[in-house]
Image (tube, rainbow, N blue to C red):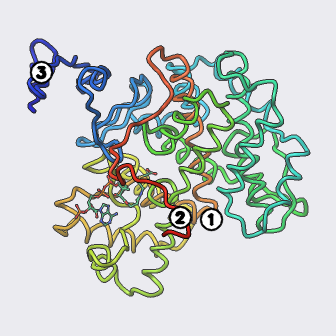
Amino acid sequence: MTLDVDVLSDVATLNVDGRELELPLIEGSEGERAIDIQRLRAETGLVTYDPGYGNTGSCISDITFIDGDAGVLRYRGYPIEQLAQQSTFMETSYLILNGELPTQAQLSEFKDQITYHTLLHEDIRHMYRAFPLSAHPMAVTSAVVGALSTFYQDSLDPLDDDQVEVSTYRLLAKLPTIAACAHKYSIGQPFNYPQNDLDYAENILHMMFSTPTEAYDVNPTFARAIDVLLILHAEHEQNCSTSTMRMVGSSQANIYASASAAIMALWGPLHGGANQAVIEMLHDVADNEGSGKAFLERCKDRDDTTRLMGFGHRVYKNFDPRALILKEAADGVLRELGRSTQMLEIAQEIEAQALDDDYFVSRKLYPNVDFYSGIIYEALGIPIHTFTAFFALGRMPGWIAQWREQGKDPAARIGRPRQIYTGENERQFQPIEQR
Ligand code: CMC
């Protein structure tokens, strides 16, 4: 079997079993090329084998561009660095969902729609009591987001644009309330109602930290730090949770069901759960390992399952640009708040040692977004088990935009990969007494 790619005629020619098949090449707006294999199985009986989908383009998308070798990330064409510095999470969410930056009027209308929907139905609030106090906020958040499909049965049709629109606002508006209630429940404090005169990040902090007994003034440094973190997490093309959102949505399951599944996918420590795992790792190094160097030896040891959490990425083979922004932001936030820099120092030491070590260098393992984010969350007083819920708050506009894009894509079909079966060939059933 051979596969020849002819750049000039934009086809790849596959020679297999004495047959020749021309497969079209498609090219994205940044020059990334792909072989379109949609006719492959029908014409040759062959399927492709690509565990983890590292070489598979599952869709055509206009939303996010990543150049993993150059460390570039752009939402709708805008560099992440510019958005983190100059935009707000609400404006960036509008951009991701609608493709263009809003005018002042469009942004006001968008924010009005979101603040209108921040409140939870009182019966949803009762759901929390069914969970043990020790429940992880990601499990609770996913369950409550899934349950929105029981409270909003008027807007479950994925083919109805108006229903999708109102569900978009509901998800973006209610997720902070849902996640904050999960936190409050876990520490035995009363739930806070949202305050719609606060902006998105301020409202999150109010719902997380205020109590009925004392005045709580939102610290603007905290709020801006949260807003930047949300912007950096807002979208990241076809990662595990976004692919889950699309996969579930591809069966025409409603948007709440799809988002609930995406939250579960994000929870895993190889994905969004890494932000919790990183801070636990840094504390472990501080308390037990003594030095980052000894810890790195364990990460390199093939007989040890320990990984350097917050390092490595499927797409970035260079610095994750989000990690660069967060490293600087962590330094600024800790200094501004006068917090201990011990975790940051340990992280910086580990990073320097890893980037001077052939194991990490040869595998192109660099800090990813989760390496420094937990240090900021911790400095802001966010409990460790809630870090990944903050990632979910940030990622929601990206999940929704990808789900909506798929809904409008004429090429989209139900997600249904093939497999290469390696089990038993046909055999005859033996009654139990004869085995
Ligand atoms: N520590 C030690 N070794 C690593 C690490 C790590 N963090 N990451 C990858 N490797 C090694 C891996 O053992 C393998 O080595 P070898 O070739 O000798 O078998 C090689 O590097 C390639 O790794 P891989 O597992 O094939 O890479 P992948 O693209 O399948 O996985 C990853 C990507 C992010 C899951 C992985 O790098 C990892 O587990 N990192 C730690 C968890 C983490 O920080 N996740 C957050 C990712 S970014 C934000 C997000 O997605 O939520």
State how far apart marks 1 and 3 are (Cα).
56 Å
- Marks 3 and 2: in contact by CB < 8 Å? no
Q: Earlier in the sequence, mark 1 or mark 3?
A: 3
Q: Residue at x 29, y 33 (%)?
A: 47
Q: CA distance from mark 2 to mark 3?
A: 52 Å
- Which image quadrant shows ligand 1? bottom left
Ligand 1 is within 8 Å of the C-beta of the residue at disc 3? no
Q: Residues within 10 Å of mark 1 (few under 14, many from 20)?
A: some
Q: Which residue is mark 2?
A: 276
- Pointers 1 and 3 in contact (C-beta within 8 Å): no
Q: Secondary structure at mark 2?
A: helix
**How far apart are labels 1 and 2 at the CA level?**
7 Å
Pointer 1 or 2: first along the chain: 2
Q: Nearer the viewer, residue 148 or 226?
A: 148
Label 2 C-beta lies within 8 Å of the nearest ligand 1 atom: no
Q: Amino acid at mark 1?
A: His
Residue 226 horizontal/vertical position (percent):
59, 49
**Against 240, is 361 above or below?**
below
Q: Which residue is mark 1?
A: 385
User: Which kind of residue does numbered mark 2 sit on?
Assistant: Gln
Q: Quadrant of residue 3?
A: top left
Residue where numbered disc 3 is placed? 19
Please report the residue visible at 85 percent of the width from the left and 46 percent of the height from the top. 124
Residue at the image position 56 percent from the left and 25 percent from the top = 97
Badge 2 or badge 3: first in the primary sequence: 3
